Image (cartoon, rainbow, N blue to C red):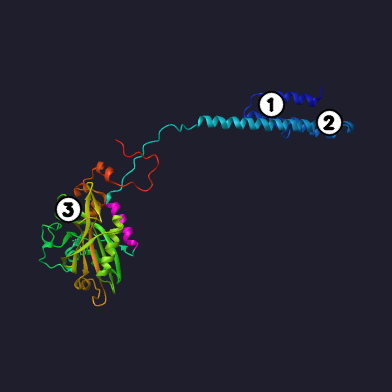
Amino acid sequence: MSEIKKIKEEYLLKLNKDLDQNKLNEIKTELFGKNGVVSTKFKQLGSIAENKRKELASELNYLKNELEELILKKNENIQNKEINKKLENEKIDITLPGRTYFAGKIHPVSQVIDEVTSIFSEIGFSVEEGPDVENEYYNFSALNTPENHPARDMHDTFYLDNSKDLLLRTHTSPVQIRTMLKSKPPFKIIVPGRTYRHDSDQTHSPMFHQLEGLHIDKNVNMGHLKGCLYYFVKKFFEVEKVRIRFRPSHFPFTEPSAEVDIGYKIQDGKIKIGEGDKWLEILGCGMVHPNVLKNAKVNPKQYQGYAFGVGIDRLAMLKYGINDLRAFFESDIRWLEFYGFDPLDVPTNYRGLSR
Ligand code: PHE
């Protein structure tokens, strides 16, 4: 048997065994490495008699191609086997139920603040904030509320540390003054925030939320106030038509002043806004009193406008059918689970809060 045939047989045998990648690489080097069996044969060609050289060279080439092809195939086999093994080991059982996701809920008050803010920002209002702890000047005096006004009574207002000056703001109106003092007119702002009054029953909580609105410019009148409130009520309650009633009222910081009622009826035990002949008070408003503008360094001969104050918690109760205000602030997770809102990106395997 020729030497080449011997090599061929020897290596066919070796290559047909069950090999791993390392073993295969070893064989490859044995054959084609620098001093490999086949490489050495090629080197020896030069010293062979010319008449035999051609034949031997072609035999050698043939062997080389055959073995190389076999190694390539073998390589592919080993790699496929490895991939299959991996797939087998890393298999995911998609029939297993997903893990329960504990997602929080958005409190109705936060939800309503978000809704109201986006409604007013569509018509050019920007958001301002002010401190919960106020002094008498911003909460009352600058708002044209005289010393002897009943709102200043200890029964309504929480004063701090028997201070005659520091208090928890009783409304968001002091932010009107703060905003006007820190820049120049025109002003078109809303102010959502916490407010405090000495009061507690089904519809009153000592801490509650208000939304203040203020629009001051050169030609702002009561028609604008009306238009703005119609727009707001329709957008917020998502109704086409709405009945609104302006009732003359009194606030020290507006003149004239009005309280606003919206029409509603009860249908199937649920409240329907915009229909029916019942009236529900939702906010206080009016044209900002010239004294307030003066206190805020705005010239009332040049500028005027309207202000309003809405109870945010009350809006939430009306829109989402919640009937006890106090439950808003009791931090009962079962209540929140029921009345709260899902955050926008709830994962698909969300199954609620389970206990
Ligand atoms: N601050 C008033 C209140 O708390 C509401 C209000 C705001 C009225 C602005 C008129 C103008 O009752």
The earlier-in-sequence mark between 3 and 2 is 2
Dot 1: within a 10 Å radius of its alpha carbon, few (fewer than 14), some, or many (20 or more) residues?
Answer: some
On the picture, is 322 further left or further right than 17?
left
Q: What type is the residue that disc 1 sits on?
A: Leu
Q: Residue at x 69, y 26 (%)?
A: 15
Q: Say which of 5 and 107 sits in front.
A: 107
Residue 303: give x, y in percent of width and height: 26, 74
Q: What type is the residue that disc 2 sits on?
A: Leu
Q: What type is the residue that disc 3 sits on?
A: Pro
Look at the image and say whether residue 271 sits in the magenta stretch: no
The residue under label 3 is 206
Answer yes or no: disc 3 within 8 Å of ligand 1: no
Callout 3: helix, strand or loop? loop
Q: Which mark is residue 15?
A: 1
Q: Which mark is residue 264?
A: none
* In front: label 1 or label 3: 3
Residue 89: give x, y in percent of width and height: 51, 30
Q: Quadrant of ligand 1?
A: bottom left
Q: Residue at x 71, y 32 (%)?
A: 69
* In front: label 3 or label 2: 3
The residue under label 2 is 56
